[in-house]
Amino acid sequence: MPDSHAQRHNTLGIHGLHTQSSAHDLHRLALFRRAKWLVLGIIALLGIGAALVLFQRSVHAQELAAQTQESSALHVSFTHPVFGKGQQQLQLPGTLQGYMETPIYARTSGYVSHWYKDIGEPVKAGELLADISTVEVEQQLAGARATRQQNQATLQLARSSFERWQAMRQRDAVSQQELDERQSAFNAAQANLQASEAEVQRLTQLVAYNRVVAPFAGIITKRNVDVGTLVDAGNGGAPKLLYAISQTDPLRVYVSVPQSDSPHLKAGIAAHITLSELPGESFTGKVVRTAGAIDTATRTLQVEINVPNHDRRLLPGSYVQVSLQVDAAKQSVLTVPNNSLLFRAEGTLVATVTPNGTVHLQKVSLGRDLGARIELLSGVTPTDRVIVNPSDSLADNDQVIATEQAAPQATPAPAANTTTQTGGKS
């Protein structure tokens, strides 16, 4: 029976059907295995990619956190207080003035007939500046002289009358009352003559004032008159000012020295005068006197300095800087940059950095202002780390990152200037 079945298949032309079915199953199994490994590879790659992404995100998050923490920290610079030198250069502003300066007014009324000196011209003491025509005053003088002559005649008559009545009284020819009346008339005539004489002298002096002369040697700095100008006697205001004169050698300059430096200033101390319009040049003066008292309004001491000006290079009225060499003798005074101060309601403070990087606000007492630096009388030590240019919002216990600035130099003594003047440029 089986043979008949195989024979029937052979007859129909169907050969190896079972063999082909087995081969097809093997091919499908291989494809399935390949697909399985491909899926597993893709899943592995996706897992590795996800792990890498998560790792990168974790690294970026850590970096961002570190950057955020670093950026949130406050960076500051600090310096250490240093001792100032014994000698300090005190810089003060001032204005040059003539050694003697005065406005000249008319002492008599009239019209200006001539003027002889203009601005910038040197004059000597007593030199004629202008002539004033005083016709009215001269007429008053003539009238006063006439009155004096009248009083002289009246006095002569009163004297002779009194002498006669005095002789008659000795003979008892007149009464004592009549003699007293003649004596009173004589005394009144004497007084009238003296009054008229005083008036003549006054008007004579007024007429002499028609010559306006220089009171001292100097330079004419103002001229407010011309021929025909009407002037009045007195100094009632600027329109009546005739001339202004200034003595320019030597010159004076007054400076206001802070009270803290006043004990170290004495007559004879050298002063160096500089002007912005003459860079690189210095003019040497000398302290001649001080006010001897502190001004209660400004807490300063007024100091007068004389500056020789033989060559007249310095002009009165110029704004100058005065440098005074002050022997402070304060070796124990610490100085800090003036931009390290904090001004709060509780007073003047400095911010210091502690070893653990926190801020500590310390109250200080101020000394002299030395320009770029300022003295601190108390509150700091040389080992303190003082923050430079602190923020207004800085508070106690703030965490900061501090870096040290370059070590500052001690307060320098004033350098010698290239040009000095002790009566001229040297």
Image (spheres, rainbow, N blue to C red):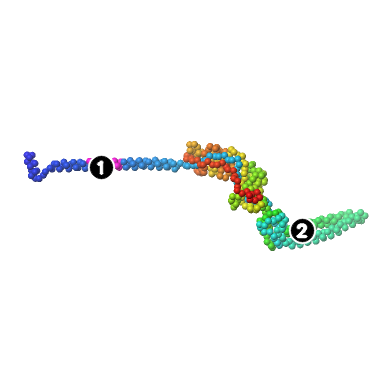
Q: Give the range drawn in magenta.
A: 33-47
Name the image quarter holding the N terminus.
top left
Residue 55 falls in which quadrant of the image? top left
Query: Does the rendering let one see residue 241?
Result: no
Residue 24 is situated, as x and y percent measured from the top left of the image, at 17, 43
Residue 356 appears left or right of 97: left
Residue 333 is situated, as x and y percent measured from the top left of the image, at 58, 39
The amino acid marked with disc number 2 is Thr
Q: How far apart are marks 1 and 2 (CA)?
A: 137 Å
Residue 43 appears left or right of 410: left
The residue at the point 60 percent across, 52 percent down is: 278
Q: Residue tagged by mark 2?
A: 204
Q: What element carries label 1?
A: helix
Residue 323 is situated, as x and y percent measured from the top left of the image, at 61, 46
Give the number of the disc on residue 173: none
Residue 329 falls in which quadrant of the image? top right
Q: Residue tagged by mark 1?
A: 38
Residue 288 drawn in magenta? no
Residue 150 appears left or right of 54: right
Classify 10 Å Cα crowding around label 2: few (below 14), some (14-19), many (20 and above): some
